Amino acid sequence: MKSVAQRPAPATRHVVSINDLSDQDIQSVFDTAQGYLDTLGDRQLPYRLAKSSRVASGRILATLFYEPSTRTRLSFESAMLRLGGEVITSADPATSSAAKGESLADSVRVISSYADAIVIRHPRDGAARLAAEYSPIPVINGGDGSHEHPTQTLCDVFTLKRKNKNLKKLNVAISGDLRGSRTIHSFVYALARLGASIVPMPAPGMELPAHVDRRLREEFNCSFRPAKGAIGALYMTPDEPHQPALFADPDFEIDVKPSASRSEQKIAAVYVTRFQKERWADKDQAYPKIDAQFLKDAKYSQASVLHPLPRVGELDVSLDTDTRAVYFEQAAYGVPVRMALIALLLGLPDGPAMETYSGGFAPAERPLYDHPFTEGLSCSNRNCIVHEPMEAPYVRNKFHVVRGEDGCRLRCLYCEHDSEGFVVASRKNKWYADDPSLLLTEADHTLKDLVAFRDGASAQEAGYRARQQAAPRRRSKPAS
């Protein structure tokens, strides 16, 4: 059989966060996905693939799932098979070496010898980032705890793009468990980059986590504006974002009366999520339901209804025949979109050109605090992968030092949660001070010399003493 010539694969790239992809990367994925729909699509159902390619012949994708999955795992496996490649899978941790106590770091290093790329799902936040540290082949995050689910966001945004053409300044409502849903966290970062206005509609007590809210304001330049009426509040992106908005089209405008205020504008899309009961101790909480009555409000008259699925009562089945319901189409796009991402990562012949895969979205450069896991402050998120006992030998206390509106914070490299209110100690001089900003100024020290502790008691237990402020010099009297 004639082999298909392939371009050399690029240097190993991982997709742990939606922000590991630049705007140009995402556009390349979407263009390629559309190409698959055009050439391999079902003539009766234009969002479904009906044929396969052979461009990934000889390539293997490993799916490593520590949590249940239907759409993500099967769409990735279908994507690889549609590309002409093969799939190996570990879909149940109870039947894998994880049940024997094998660490994720070891599993990834072994599996990387069996495949060309790995898709991972894990209940711990930051697990995909840890896997990427130990993998010589591309790691794709299929959902890690309540952190992120970047490929779901690619499917979501691809769906929105097909329905709305240009996404800049569109009002996109997000409903349900905004705190525990990893799909929401990736999605709002993407919406902020696109220039859309985010309309949060959380279930009681399920607002966006503080660290996600901060990033929207500080890193993506969103402003949060409470408003009167049913909408309640908006995360609004600036007219001139710090990176060009995707899919800009000056000929497209939102259908809004010139006199209407932001709170009265129409909603372009409603994104619904289920109650993430696996991430909450209280399983019996009040939860909003989206049904035909809800959508009768005039502002939803042309709103597309999206849902990452599965649904468990928060989305009424009566909406399935409503022309605004696009969630099954959204799920179908998982195959061509993930095919395109695999093609990009592996450098397949009909994938995006290598030069367009530019290295990801570029946040502000920040110092990296990197210390042994046994020393000083560890991530404040108890579900972070660093607190998984089996991973203790493989992780470090790694944080980006962030200067925010409310002072200095440490953002976990793995799960991106923020820690604040800590004390800083000097390893050289054995003192500590209640001054997190020392990590920003450093003065006569380096980040290797400075150690963060949860509080003064923790620093004292480690052998440090409180730093004494230097007393002001007293002027000597002149000789008489």
Image (cartoon, helix red, strand yellow):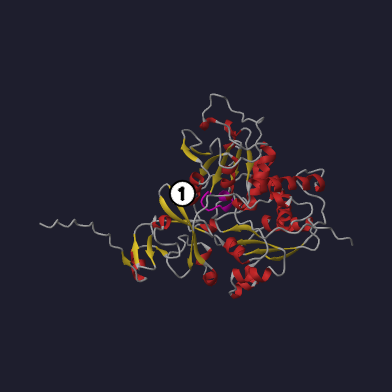
Q: Amino acid at mark 1?
A: Gly
Where is residue 228 shown, x and y percent of the image?
46, 33
Using the image as rendered, state which of residue 445 and residue 176 is in the foreground: 445
* Magenta-drawn segment: 177-185
Q: Quadrant of residue 451?
A: bottom left
The quarter in which the N terminus is drawn is: bottom right
Residue 387 relative to residue 61: left or right: left
Disc 1 is placed on an element classified as loop
Which residue corresponds to the image point at 37% horizontal and 64% vertical from the top-left? 425
**Residue 307 versus residue 436 in the image, above or below:** above
Rendered residue at 68%/51% (across/down): 357
Q: Does the stretch in magenta take in 389?
A: no
Residue bearing the label numbered 1: 205
Residue located 55% across and 35% down the image: 239
Residue placed furthest toward the front: 480
Indicate the position of residue 307 as horizontal and vertical percent values. 63, 46
| Quadrant location of the C terminus in the rendered image | bottom left
Evaluate whether residue 124 shows in this view: yes
Apparent side of residue 178 relative to residue 2 in the rendered image (left or right): left
Vertical relation: 288 (above or below) 477: above
